[in-house]
Image (spheres, grey):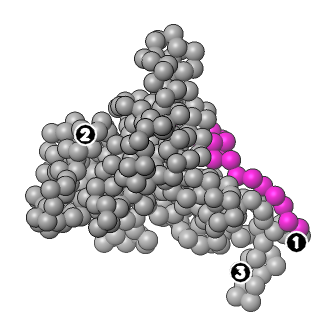
């Protein structure tokens, strides 16, 4: 990759094309320039702690990021459209791993609206890509019908060659202990089934509310629900009460940092306010890095005073310290970091933007050293 030259007359055009501010582009380009000057790593440099933080075979993307390209009508554009063409473009960029966000595309794309798993697998193989997971639907109740549906989803995942099957939602959006107890019971059943019947790791994906504090202490409100907290976070309770052999987590590192910004104080049973700063990296290492087979490598530009505290930006253009996070997490080389950018699509004004971001973000991910 050619490092962007901040002094170049092409800089404004580059900024417009990938939607970065001058500050964001400068920060990303400075890091890339430093990596470029350093040159290829020797084995001794890697042994000294300056190795690649994301192995080449683990450079991944969730297809939600490029959903506009997958969903567009190939009859109306020359841009990559549908799974087959987008796979080829992502492979050209250098990605090796794919996380699905459902299996539908534009009806006019090759393979039709919902290509068969065998067809998708052939397209993956043709481009040297591996499927690692899917943000699908996890049954909200356990019945014969929902278990049959879950088994069918697992069978499709096996055809696609996945090692994991999951959901893009938290186990429950509730703040109350009883609902998390029900979710844990359900996920233990499904996780054991996924592993023992299908050889898959079942994972849940977090958003920031999952790291808010569980309401599990009195006094009760008018509906008999607790209004205060013992200080345990919702998802931490879930991890403590699900079987680590069968239930896994995909930490969205962006939303974990939003949680750090948002959820730092709780009201204790005695009515006092207690500060407890959330630490995403420490949480992973405390619960065991093997419990987190996947990450969402989503970057954020710091926006103090806003609701989330961060704005989603291309990888390498934000303020989240991925070098510290990926360099500090245990079981190096085990995790599958999937790049995600919810707002990558450029709409009608810039229909090629999401794939341009894919190139930019891949280059930054590939150059991470630590």
SS at mark 3? Answer: loop
- Tell me which residue sits at (56%, 27%) in the image: 370
Residue 117 lies left or right of residue 193; in this view the side is left
Camera-side residue of 21 and 187: 21
- The label nearer to you, 2 versus 3, is 2
Q: What is the distance, in whole Å, between disc 2 and disc 3 at their CAs?
A: 51 Å
Q: Residues within 10 Å of mark 1 (few under 14, many from 20)?
A: few
Q: Earlier in the sequence, mark 3 or mark 1?
A: 3
Q: Specify the label residue 91 is tagged with.
A: 2
Q: Earlier in the sequence, mark 1 or mark 2?
A: 2
Q: What is the distance, in whole Å, between disc 3 and disc 1 at their CAs?
A: 16 Å
- Tell me which residue sits at (63%, 42%) in the image: 281
* Magenta segment boundaries in residue numbering: 272-290
Quadrant of the rendered structure where residue 166 is? bottom left
SS at mark 1? Answer: loop
Residue position for label 3: 225
What percent of the width, then of the height, locates residue 208? 59, 61
- The label nearer to you, 3 versus 1, is 1
Q: Residues within 10 Å of mark 3 (few under 14, many from 20)?
A: some
Residue 225 in view here: yes
**Is 262 placed above or below 294 here?**
below
In the rendered structure, does residue 273 fall within the stretch colored magenta? yes
Quadrant of the rendered structure where residue 154 is? bottom left
Camera-side residue of 195 and 67: 67
Residue 238 lies left or right of residue 141; in this view the side is right
Q: Is mark 2 in CB contact (under 8 Å) with mark 3?
A: no
What percent of the width, then of the height, locates residue 150? 32, 62
């Amino acid at each position: 990759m050619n490092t962007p030259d901040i002094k170049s007359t092409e800089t404004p055009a580059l900024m417009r094309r990938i939607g970065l501010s001058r500050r964001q582009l400068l920060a990303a380009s400075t890091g890339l320039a430093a990596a470029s000057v350093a040159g290829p790593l020797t084995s001794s440099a890697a042994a000294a702690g300056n190795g690649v933080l994301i192995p080449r075979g683990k450079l991944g993307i969730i297809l939600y990021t490029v959903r506009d390209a997958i969903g567009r009508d190939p009859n109306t554009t020359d841009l990559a459209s549908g799974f087959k063409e987008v796979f080829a473009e992502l492979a050209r960029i250098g990605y090796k791993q794919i996380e699905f966000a459902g299996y539908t595309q534009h009806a006019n794309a090759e393979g039709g609206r919902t290509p068969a798993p065998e067809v998708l697998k052939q397209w993956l193989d043709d481009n040297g890509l591996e499927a690692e997971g899917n943000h699908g639907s996890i049954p909200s109740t356990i019945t014969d019908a929902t278990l049959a549906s879950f088994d069918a989803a697992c069978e499709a995942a096996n055809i696609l060659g996945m090692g994991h099957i999951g959901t893009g939602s938290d186990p429950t959006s509730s703040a109350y202990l009883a609902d998390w107890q029900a979710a844990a019971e359900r996920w233990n059943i499904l996780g054991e089934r996924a592993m023992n019947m299908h050889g898959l790791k079942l994972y849940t994906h977090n958003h920031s509310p999952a790291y808010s504090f569980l309401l599990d202490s009195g006094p009760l409100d008018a509906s008999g629900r607790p209004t205060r907290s013992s200080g345990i976070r919702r998802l931490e309770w879930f991890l403590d009460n699900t079987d680590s052999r069968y239930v896994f987590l995909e930490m969205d590192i962006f939303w974990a940092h939003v949680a750090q910004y948002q959820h730092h104080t709780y009201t204790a049973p005695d009515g006092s306010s207690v500060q407890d700063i959330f630490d995403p990296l420490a949480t992973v290492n405390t619960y065991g890095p093997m419990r987190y087979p996947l990450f969402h490598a989503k970057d954020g530009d710091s926006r103090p005073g806003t609701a989330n505290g961060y704005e989603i930006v291309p990888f390498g253009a934000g303020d989240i310290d991925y070098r510290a996070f990926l360099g500090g997490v245990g079981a190096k080389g085990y995790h599958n970091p999937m790049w995600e950018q919810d707002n990558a699509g450029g709409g009608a004004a810039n229909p090629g933007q999401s794939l341009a971001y894919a190139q930019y973000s891949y280059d930054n991910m590939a150059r991470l050293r630590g």
